[in-house]
Image: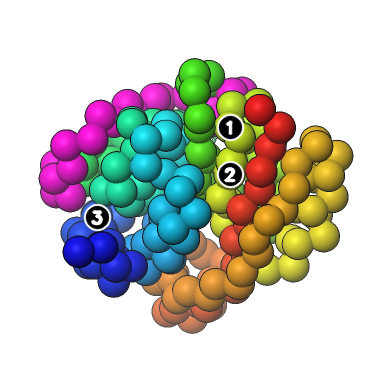
């Protein structure tokens, strides 16, 4: 029987969040429902099974582990914060996947891995919107251009024109775009209330191989 999006979200519900989230790194966890939604669509598009999947800014490993549950040849989580990678490793144990996973401690904006063969990037990069570093996601997209032939990326709402023009400038094509909103527990000072609703947009881009 085909696994559903809800099955995947259920499997990812055990993923633990950041212990000491750093605002400067935009360390908020991607909600399991959003990760499951994106990975499920990627799976339906044949963008996961048998391919290398790379999660840039892997954090707690939510996307790496979600992809790992859908039969890639291997999954690679790249993360600049060593403490987050410790959590991601523990989350791998909780999720219980047998897929080969590599956790890479590196700056994702520097194309630190160059997998051979078909490669899909799945990522929720920092947006930079709140800390005056607008389009911090641009450098993550640049890495996707360098290492992948397909990418799925989560951006803040209103990013469509930027993403489409970035893709066109790099001989890529946005083939799917959809909106997703989620609620976040407030962890950082600039939020005035307990929970914030975040509007995001997700894009599938085909890059030249
Ligand atoms: C919005 S969070 C995404 C978290 C992840 N999807 C999860 O659910 O845990 C962005 C992540 O990118 C990481 N990050 C920020 N700058 C980075 C960089 N230059 N290279 C690698 N990771 C980076 C942050 O530490 C954080 O874990």
Q: Position of residue 134 (x, y in %)?
A: 74, 51
Q: Secondary structure at mark 2?
A: strand
Instruction: Name the mark on residue 151.
Output: 2
Label 1 with label 2: CB-CB less than 8 Å? yes
Q: Is residue 140 left or right of residue 48?
A: right
Q: Which residues are magenta?
A: 93-111
Task: Give the CA distance from mark 1 to mark 2.
Answer: 7 Å
Q: Position of residue 105 (x, y in %)?
A: 41, 25
**Front residue (pair 208, 31):** 208
Residue wearing tag 3: 15
Mark 3: which secondary structure? loop
Label 1 secondary element: loop
Can residue 24 be seen here? The reply is no
Ligand 1 within 8 angstroms of badge 3 C-beta: yes
Which numbered mark, 2 or 3, is in the foreground of this view? 2
Image coordinates of residue 15 in percent, x first then y, are: 24, 55
Q: CA distance from mark 1 to mark 3?
A: 26 Å
Mark 2 or mark 3: whose residue is earlier in sequence: 3
Left or right placement of residue 195 versus residue 18 in this view:
right
- Quadrant occupied by the C terminus: top right
Tell me the crowding category of disc 3: few under 14, some 14 to 19, or many 20 or more residues within 10 angstroms, Cα based: many
**Residue 98 visible, this angle:** yes
Q: Which mark is residue 148?
A: 1
Residue at 72% across, 53% down: 174
């Amino acid at each position: 029987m085909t696994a559903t999006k809800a099955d995947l979200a259920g499997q990812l519900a055990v993923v633990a969040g950041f212990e000491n989230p750093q605002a400067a790194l935009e360390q908020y966890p991607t909600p399991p429902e959003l990760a499951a939604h994106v990975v499920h669509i990627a799976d339906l598009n044949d963008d996961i099974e048998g391919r290398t999947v790379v999660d840039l800014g892997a954090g707690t490993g939510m996307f790496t582990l979600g992809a790992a549950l859908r039969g890639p040849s291997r999954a690679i989580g790249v993360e600049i914060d060593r403490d987050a990678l410790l959590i991601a490793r523990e989350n791998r144990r909780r999720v219980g996947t047998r897929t080969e996973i590599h956790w890479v401690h590196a700056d994702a904006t520097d194309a630190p891995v160059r997998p051979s063969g078909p490669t899909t990037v799945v990522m929720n990069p920092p947006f930079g919107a709140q800390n005056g570093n607008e389009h911090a996601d641009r450098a993550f997209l640049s890495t996707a251009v360098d290492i992948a032939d397909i990418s799925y990326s989560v951006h803040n709402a209103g990013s469509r024109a930027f993403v489409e023009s970035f893709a066109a400038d790099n001989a890529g094509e946005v083939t799917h775009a959809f909106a997703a909103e989620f609620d976040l527990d407030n962890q950082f000072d600039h939020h005035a209330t307990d929970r914030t609703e975040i509007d995001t947009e997700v894009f599938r881009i085909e890059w030249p191989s």
